[in-house]
Image: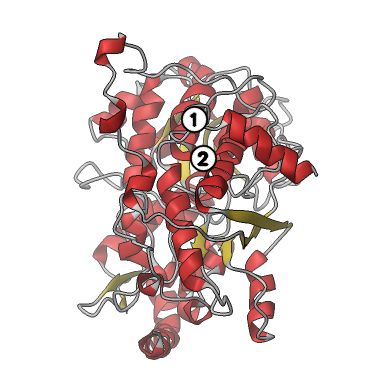
Amino acid sequence: MKRILCLLLAALLTLPLFTACSESKTNREDEPAKETAGSGGSPDQTPAEETEHHYYDDIAEKNLNGFGYRIISRLSRVDHDVQSFTDYGNNEIDAEELDGTQINDCVFNRNRELEKRYNFIFNATQIDLNPMNTVKTSILAQSDDYDAVVDSIGSMVSYEMFYNLDNLDDMNLSEPCWDQNVNRSLSVGNKHYVAVGDMLILDKKGTWCHLFNKPMAADLQLENLYDAVREGTWTMDKFYSMSQTAVQDLNGNGKLEETDRWGFLTESYNINILMFGGGTRFSSKNEEDYPVLDMMNDRTVEVFEIAHKIMADRDSSLSMSWSKNGAADCLKAFSEDRGLFYMTGIGTAMEFRYMDSDFGILPIPKYDEQQDAYYTSFSKYNSACVAVPVSCLNADTVGFILQATCLASTDTLKTTFYDTVLNGVTVRDPESRDMLDILFGNRVFDLLFINNWGSMADLYSALLSMDSNVLASAYKRREKATLRAIDEAIREYEKLD
């Protein structure tokens, strides 16, 4: 009965263009949507209805005859303690009812409109951890339990578990609603088994950035950091120098502790983010679109030297990897104006809505001013992609639903997340919005890093944990195993449909 009432309510509230999707009645989780440029105008400036483009113009009309669409993803912990840890769950898959918050209501309206238009039902399952492990168990048992799975990119590396998305009827990954950078980076043999697109926001929340505390930057009389980014002078050396000036023993006991003031809040994983930001990679692709080990060169050695120096300096950085209370110490330090820089995910930045002090968002610094662009990566653990399990008996139907959902999300979910939640709640100045454009436009995805062939993806963090900067010999010890693992992976890729 609750489900029926929700569907009836959706019929009254939802319009084909989802005009109510990004509106919010309350301020419980998110602030009300702000009016965007171009949203006003006189009636004679409004395009005629017949000239407007709708998402359903790009996909065939279908009646799915009440198909029950079973999609599994991570549970979102809406009521978690934001000062202890960040929620990296999927709150963009489905919503049971309207609750006055922007993302929830947008997803509810989008899904109910899709259900009405194509006559199917969302049956969403969310579990606390590792939905892909549940799907693997189902596949190995030859049980058709799930039609689609959403999990972290690092959990979705077993491509043999999934359909080739290129072969599904009505699924077209070349549409702009799908992330073309992911298509290029995570394909193998020019085939696509996982995808990222506008129907997801966890991939964006899992994109790494650099937060900076504005009151601390002002106290330290730092230069305008946004200008530094625009001028191409936001480099690792500049970032490190600024970090060192921020440190202070607040209680005067002669030693630095979690409650003191820090220049850099971080974790061991972030040495990889710095390496990507410096323009280095673990692998590239050959002409057949298969991975090639492409890691050890002069550039890698140069970037590693400064990245390791930054990450190993316990006199300027507080790392959740060695602090007493882990992530909570970094979250607390930043919110209390005791951390100048914080390298973390966009999702963590969103948790600082409650923070009184202003903060800004920056890209990961370049290695030097000659670098062509700013690059960032993501947490392979706290990100998201979607796939169709090979056990699914209605893969073409699922492909249609995925395509329709992604197309329907561009002007609804994506707009709500990017323009309203980020620009209206998390991002507190127009300059940070420009920084987000840089971040999302230059994300790096690397097959070797995601698969960790030969344990090579752990090399930088392993050296950091050993307080060693001897890169060349450590690389050599893992090289053969990595090459063998890549060759084996390619042989398996070649067998895929």
Residue in the picture at 49% in, 39% down: 413
* Count of marks placed on residues: 2
Q: Where is residue 14 in the image (x, y as percent from the top left)?
A: 55, 32
Residue 52 vertical position relative to residue 114 in the rendered view, above or below:
above
The residue closer to the viewer here, 338 or 250, is: 338
Q: Position of residue 401 (x, y in %)?
A: 49, 58
Residue in the picture at 65% in, 53% down: 321
Query: Pointer 2 and pointer 1: residues touching (CB < 8 Å)?
Result: yes
Q: Residues within 10 Å of mark 1 (few under 14, many from 20)?
A: many
For residue 255, the mark is none
Residue in the picture at 50% in, 32% down: 15
Query: Under tag 2, what secondary structure?
Result: helix
The residue that disc 2 covers is 346
Residue 339 vertical position relative to residue 39 in the rendered view, above or below:
below
Residue 340 visible, this angle: yes
Residue 174 vertical position relative to residue 353 in the rendered view, above or below:
below
Amino acid type assigned to the residue bearing label 2 in the image: Ile
